[in-house]
Amino acid sequence: MRLGKAIYIAGLIGFSAAGMALADDVTFAASGTFNDGATLGGTLVINTGTGVVESGGLDLTVVGGEAGPGLVFDTLTSPGSDVYSDGTDNLAEIDASDSADPGPHLQLEINIGSASSLIGFTGGPLCYVPAGFPVGFPSGDNCNSNYSSYQLFEESEQPASGASRPPPAELLGGSVGPATAPEPASLLLLAGPLALLIRRQLRKS
C-alpha cells in the first residue's frame, strides 16, 4: 500500500472514531424541588456509550432556599458515577461540588431501575423523600432509604461563629432527562469533506 493511501485511510478512521465518541455524549437537564424551597436546574453530560458522567460537562444549579441567590455545582467529587442497588432498584449516584467554594455539596441519586450502569441511559426519576419528611420516610420515597440532597457545609466544616449549621436539604421530587439529542456526529459529518481534502492534497503532492 502506498504511503499516501495509508495516510488517507488512517485519517478517515481517526475522524470517524472521534465522531463516534462524540456521538455518545448526551446533555441531560436536571430539575427538581428541595424541601427548603430551593430548586434544582442545570445540565450534566453523560457518555451513554461508557456510562461515565463527563467531568467537564457538569453545570448543575441550586437556587433559593438555603442556597440563596444560587450555587453552581460544576465539579465531580468522585470520578464518573457510582452505581449500587437499594435492594429493589439500581441507583446511579453523582456527587458534585462548587469549584468556587469547596463547602457546598450536591448528591444526586438517579433511579435507573434494572439497569446496572448509565450505558444507554435515556433519563429517569431522581430519588426523593416524602413531602412531610421525615414523616413517611422511608416508605414514602421512591428509592427505599436513599434520596438526593444538597448541603452548604462539609461535615468537617464549621459555619461562621454564632451561625447555626442548616441541615441538608432533601429533594421532594425531580428527574433527569435529555436536554439535547445525542451529538450526531458533527465530526463525522466533517470527516467526509476533510478526507477528500486530504486526498486532493496527496494527489497534488
Image (cartoon, rainbow, N blue to C red):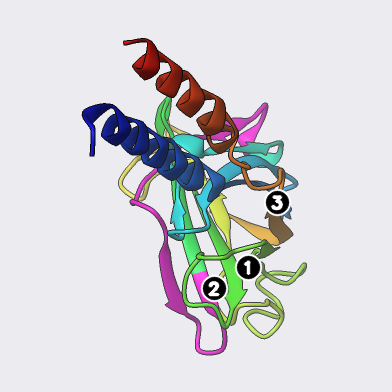
Cα distance in 3D space between marks 1 and 2:
7 Å
First to last magenta residue range: 67-91
Q: Residue at x 66, y 67 (%)?
A: 128
Relative vertical location of residue 50 with respect to residue 197 in this rendering, above or below: below
Q: What element carries label 3?
A: strand
User: Which residue is label 3 attached to?
Assistant: 178
Q: Is residue 105 visible?
A: no
Q: Position of residue 151 (x, y in %)?
A: 51, 47
Q: Position of residue 88 (x, y in %)?
A: 56, 89
Mark sitting on residue 92: none
Q: Can residue 53 be seen in this view?
A: yes
Assess whether mark 2 and mark 1 are in contact (beta carbons under 8 angstroms): yes
Q: Which residue is drawn at 70% across and 51% down?
A: 178
Cα distance in 3D space between marks 1 and 3:
18 Å
Assess whether mark 3 and mark 1 are in contact (beta carbons under 8 angstroms): no
- Density class for disc 2 (Cα within 10 Å; few <14, some 14-19, many ≥20) is some
Q: Is residue 90 magenta?
A: yes
Relative vertical location of residue 68 with respect to residue 111 in this rendering, above or below: above
Looking at the image, is mark 1 or mark 3 nearer the viewer? 3
Closer-to-camera residue (130/116): 116
Mark sitting on residue 127: 1
Three-letter code, disc 1: Cys
Q: Is mark 2 on a helix, strand or loop?
A: loop
Cα distance in 3D space between marks 3 and 2:
23 Å
**In the image: residue 202, left or right of residue 151:** left
Q: Is residue 113 magenta?
A: no
Three-letter code, disc 3: Pro
